[in-house]
Structure formats: structure tokens, C-alpha cells
């Protein structure tokens, strides 16, 4: 048995915290771009991608608050099985994506858009599959996106459809290895029964330097984990054993194919900070998630298990 895992805990570099999906007043967000940047900088983020709808919002270097600002855009195209649109964030693009003249967005296939994002030098992430009501057939019908949003703060607080981990497992089970990112999709929308959708979910990327090139490469290679609170400290392997160490949490779950996998729960104690899983044989993938007492979660990227 062989485990393929781009293990960020065993790779060189430094951890950087960032959000990859953010709106401003230039589309449907409530804050000016510099106000959004300031809030993320004050919350200790290292990088931020502003991804206004169909618009590349660029921010002056002097308003970056010393964060790395990665150019981005959210683009909606195509028609899903049930008639909804596919939303993508294009991260690291050199210029704004322009809709082909004379075409309706629904006439542009997701596959075409993903190729165009690549030609603009960016990477494509498929947004909020649960909110978009996407099926596994929708997500398998084209290729080239590096990740799906497995958690989206705005979708969570607005309509309770923040988690798309079942969509992720559907893909992984079928051998489509994409990474999972947790994002805010921040609009700075809130009311008396709805918390603000900012600084709630992020990625922790491991790379050598805080440059766009290094962060994008780490994202492409899966050298990151996602969180809404807890931390992963280490993941390592010993023969058929997978060991994980976390910050204090209530549960640590090894998620795998159908009935395989295992959950560790803090039974009879306040918290746990480690868990161990022995591969049973026959697993195709394994990923680890943990949750604290408040329900905040963290997710590693998936490992591919290859029988030999
Ligand atoms: Zn969207
Ligand atoms: Zn959005």
C-alpha cells in the first residue's frame, strides 16, 4: 500500500493564512476595497484575493496594509443539471476575464471558462457546490479546477449551505482528486440574526515566501489545509498507520470511502489533540477533519491510497 499526499507538514517553508473569496463595493459587497483589506490585515491574515463578480478589483500597493493581494475575480457561467450556474473564483489572473462577444453566460461552458482562466495565468476554484445545487455529474463533466470550496462562510450564515464536504467525498470516491478550500465569500453582510461573513474561514498555505508565485504553486500542489478555527500540527505516516496532531478539539475524523474511516471523540475528557488510523486495505482516499466544541472545523487535503 502506498500513500500519495502532498504533506505540507513535511515540506519546507512557513505557514501563511489567507482568504481566497472576497467581495467589495465594486460588486455586491458592502465595504470599499481598502476597508476590506484593512479588516483582514487587522485579523492577522497574510494574503487576500479580492474576487468581485465579473470584475478585477485592483488595489493600490500603499493600501495593501502589507498583505499580499492576489488578483482575482468571481465568474459565473454554464448551466448545471438542475439549471443553476457554476461559479468560479479565478485566482492570480493577469487581467480581467472578458465575456466573449455576443455570448450569454449560460452558453459558456465551465470547461471553456477554466481554460480561459488558465490562459490568463490563474487557477480556477469551483465555488460553493451545495449553494449552487451542483451534482457530482456536474462536477465530473469538466476538468482543470484545482479545488472546490468545501466551506463558505457567507453561504453558511445566509442560508445554512456552507458545507460542501459531501460533494468533495463524492468526487474523491470517484477518483477525482481535487483539493478543498475553506473561504469567506465575504460581503460584509449581516443583521441581528446573522453574523458577519468576514474572517470566518481560511486556508493555511505552506510555502517558502509570501509571493503570489509561491502561494499559487502551494495551492496547486495541495500544500495547505483549511480551517474555521482549529489547527493541524502534524500529519505523519508509519507503515500502515496515519498519525495526526491537532490543537484542542472534540473530534478528529478520518474520512474515507463509504463505510471506511474512523472518528475519534473526546469521551470522558474535555479534548483530544491526536488520533491514529490504521489503513484497513481497500481505501482509495483518506482525509482528516477535526472539530472543536464550538463546531469550528479544520480539513486536511486528501491522500490517495494506492494498493500495491
Ligand atoms: Zn458565488
Ligand atoms: Zn462570491
Image: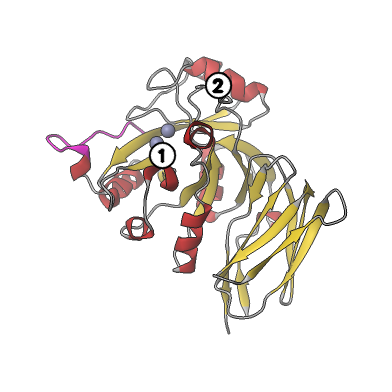
Q: Position of residue 238 (x, y in %)?
A: 76, 73
Residue stretch rendered in magenta on the structure:
90-105
Q: Residue furthest right?
A: 269
Residue, x 49% and y 16% (percent of image)? 31
Q: Residue furthest bottom?
A: 308
Q: Is residue 219 left or right of residue 89?
A: right
Q: Is residue 219 left or right of residue 248?
A: left
Q: Quadrant of residue 265?
A: bottom right
Dot 2, how many residues are within 10 Å of its Cα: few (below 14), some (14-19), or many (20+)? Answer: many
Q: Which quadrant of the figure contains the N terminus?
A: bottom right
User: Secondary structure under badge 2?
Assistant: helix
Give the mark nearer the N terminus: 2 vs 1.
Answer: 2
Dot 1, how many residues are within 10 Å of its Cα: few (below 14), some (14-19), or many (20+)? Answer: many
Q: Which residue is mark 1?
A: 89
Q: Which quadrant of the figure contains the C terminus?
A: bottom right
The answer to whether any part of residue 265 appears in the image is yes
Relative height, residue 273 to residue 260 (above, below): above
Q: Is mark 2 within 8 Å of ligand 2?
A: no
Q: Position of residue 186 (x, y in %)?
A: 50, 28
Amino acid at each position: 500500500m502506498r500513500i500519495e499526499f502532498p504533506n505540507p507538514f513535511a515540506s519546507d517553508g512557513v505557514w501563511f493564512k489567507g482568504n481566497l473569496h472576497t467581495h467589495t463595493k465594486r460588486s455586491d459587497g458592502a465595504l470599499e476595497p481598502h476597508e476590506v483589506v484593512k479588516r483582514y490585515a487587522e485579523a492577522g491574515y497574510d494574503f487576500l484575493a479580492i474576487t468581485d463578480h465579473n470584475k478585477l478589483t485592483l488595489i493600490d500597493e500603499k493600501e495593501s496594509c502589507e498583505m499580499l493581494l492576489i488578483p482575482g475575480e468571481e465568474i459565473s457561467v454554464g448551466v448545471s443539471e438542475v439549471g443553476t450556474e457554476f461559479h468560479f473564483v479565478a485566482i492570480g489572473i493577469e487581467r480581467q476575464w472578458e465575456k466573449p462577444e455576443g455570448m450569454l453566460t449560460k452558453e459558456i461552458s465551465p470547461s471553456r471558462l477554466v481554460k480561459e482562466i488558465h490562459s490568463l495565468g490563474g487557477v480556477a476554484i469551483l465555488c460553493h457546490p451545495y449553494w449552487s445545487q451542483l451534482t457530482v455529474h456536474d462536477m465530473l463533466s469538466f476538468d482543470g479546477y484545482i479545488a472546490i470550496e468545501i466551506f463558505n462562510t457567507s453561504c453558511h450564515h445566509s442560508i445554512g449551505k456552507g458545507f460542501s464536504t459531501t460533494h468533495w467525498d463524492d468526487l474523491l470516491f470517484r477518483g477525482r482528486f481535487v483539493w478543498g478550500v475553506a473561504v469567506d465569500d465575504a460581503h460584509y453582510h449581516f443583521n441581528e440574526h446573522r453574523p458577519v461573513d468576514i474572517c470566518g474561514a481560511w486556508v493555511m498555505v505552506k510555502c517558502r515566501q509570501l509571493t503570489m508565485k509561491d502561494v499559487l504553486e502551494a495551492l496547486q500542489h495541495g500544500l495547505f489545509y483549511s480551517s474555521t478555527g482549529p489547527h493541524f500540527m502534524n500529519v505523519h505516516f508509519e507503515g500502515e498507520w496515519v498519525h495526526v496532531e491537532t490543537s484542542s478539539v472534540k473530534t478528529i475524523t478520518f474520512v474515507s470511502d463509504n463505510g471506511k474511516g474512523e472518528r475519534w471523540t473526546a469521551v470522558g475528557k474535555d479534548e483530544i489533540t491526536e488520533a491514529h488510523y490504521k489503513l484497513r486495505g481497500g481505501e482509495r482516499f483518506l482525509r482528516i477533519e477535526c472539530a472543536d466544541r464550538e463546531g469550528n472545523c479544520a480539513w486536511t487535503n486528501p491522500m490517495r491510497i494506492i494498493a500495491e
